[in-house]
Image: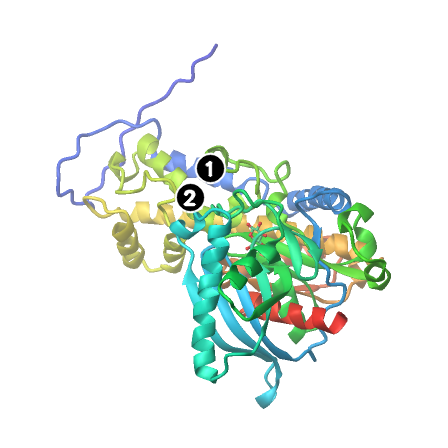
Amino acid sequence: MITPTVQLVRPAPSNKRKRTHHVAERMFEKSMDDFAAEVRDLLKVSLEPRQLLEMSEKLEVEYREKLKSSAISMLPSYLHTLPTGREIGDFLALDVGGSTFRIALIRLGERDDGRDGLRLRRVRSFLIDKSIRDLKGRAFFDWMAERIGEMLTEYNHINGTTDARLRMGLAWSFPVDQTSPRSGRLLAMGKGFCATYGVEGQDLSELIMHSCRARQLNVEMMAIVNDGAATLLSQAYRDPSTCMSLILGTGTNAAAFLPYTTLGPGKFGDRPDSWHAAAKHVLVNSEVSMFGRHVFPRTRWDDELNSKHVLPDFQPLEYMVTGRYLGEIARLILVEAVSTAGLFDGEMPARLNEPYALDTSLLAAFQNDISRSMSKASAAFLDAHPLPSPPRISELHFIRELAQLISRRAATYLATALHALWRLRTAAEGLQPGEASHVTIACNGTIVEKYPDFRACCQRQLDELCELSGAAKGAVTLAMAPESSLFGAAVAVACIGDES
Ligand code: BGC
């Protein structure tokens, strides 16, 4: 066996850094320059358009397989038409996200001042922290019902009414196996939630309604949709060219309005014949986070994150692209840089050794700080992860480059996943890429909305891939869909109400 020889290197001397305490001089396996070059190589691997196109083709094959048979991805909703934009009414919309539960009163159809007809009349937001994520089974749904009760008390107080039975729609940021427009079986939840304990497979609508009835809440669950589907619906209400969506926040997902025949017969469960007779298309929740395990190249840091995850391999794409994980990937790299290449002279910043301690917003702060001194980024870093003396400018540059590499890879892989879905949809419509009409992809989620340059980068990659596969320039547009989960939940109730 050949034992690799490890050359020990001293950290680069710097007269700029004033140490306020004594640091014993240590030796490291490699220099920071070598480490940075390695990180660059590993995170940039396969970002060439031709290679991305190959990945997209492989993903398309995976999508097709799961559209024919999978109980956890490519899940068809009951919606077989998209909104016309003329739906009207008042609804209570619920949005269970990865870190907040929001409840809103939505009015559809009020078009004063030429606005789009989607009105958020009142909204309350409740933090979902670890103690809520840890709630098991019914306890989680009781917590939801209590919050709905709080909202209704306030609403009735404001409106002076107590007897209005409110029609409710739910945007659920987790997979759900729909068994009717208003119900679905609860499937395994990611994002650290324990709500499925003891109730997995049970009717989600009934779980919520049981807790609401116990509190005599005058509400009725009328529609359940995944948040990806909700996002598509809300934007389609405004713009009929919308037929796909992307969520990128704590989690990721994409939905698409696909021809009925794209799905295998076994995917529909037990639906009435009248539904099948009417359905020419279906709104499908792809659960795209679960794809790409054998498609996207992984680094040793991705492998480490995956192996220590409570659900290894459950959502391979999600573990590389979402707000919950971008910071963690960076943290794993920084920890290795400290111990093997002498970043910060080998001094571990406070809390950097704790899993998930590095917040993705810190990476955004580095990318946002394009100043020479990078003083804002440095202050943000020291605030979260104190060090006895401030980082050197070269170290700050390294972290900024790391943030760029990690976020660019995420945007590129997402664009690839969307391109595969767009191509599949185009072919299923019987069209060549060059013949397809313009498609709007409705977007929502903190990363795609707020992370510096993320959406623009994803759009550039998508343009390049679409053009490479023969589409006209600008064939696909990523458009932000504000408040899409809440509006989409309300639009779903209105659409289902129109159909039933
Ligand atoms: C869930 C999806 C959800 C997405 C975005 C993923 O982790 O599996 O159901 O749509 O996050 O919230």
- Disc marking residue 321: none
Q: Quadrant of residue 204?
A: bottom right
Q: Is residue 311 above or below residue 107?
A: above
Q: Residue at the far top: name it.
A: 1
Give the percent coordinates (x, y) of residue 158. Answer: 44, 82
For label 2, the residue is 328
**Nearest to the observer: residue 149 or residue 312:** 149
**Colour style of the rendered protein structure:** rainbow
Is residue 316 toward the left or the right of residue 58 in the image? left
Can you tell me whether the CB of the residue at mark 2 lies under 8 Å from the nearest atom of ligand 1? no
Give the percent coordinates (x, y) of residue 120. Answer: 52, 77
At a point 72% along the width and 67% down the height, the residue shown is: 438
Q: Amino acid at mark 1?
A: Leu
* Number of callouts: 2
Q: Residue at the far left: name it.
A: 21
Task: Mark 1 and mark 2 in contact? Answer it, CB < 8 Å.
Answer: yes
Q: Is residue 454 visible?
A: yes
**Nearest to the observer: residue 59 or residue 234:** 234
Task: Label 2, secondary structure: give it.
Answer: helix
For label 1, the residue is 305
Task: Label 1, secondary structure: give it.
Answer: helix
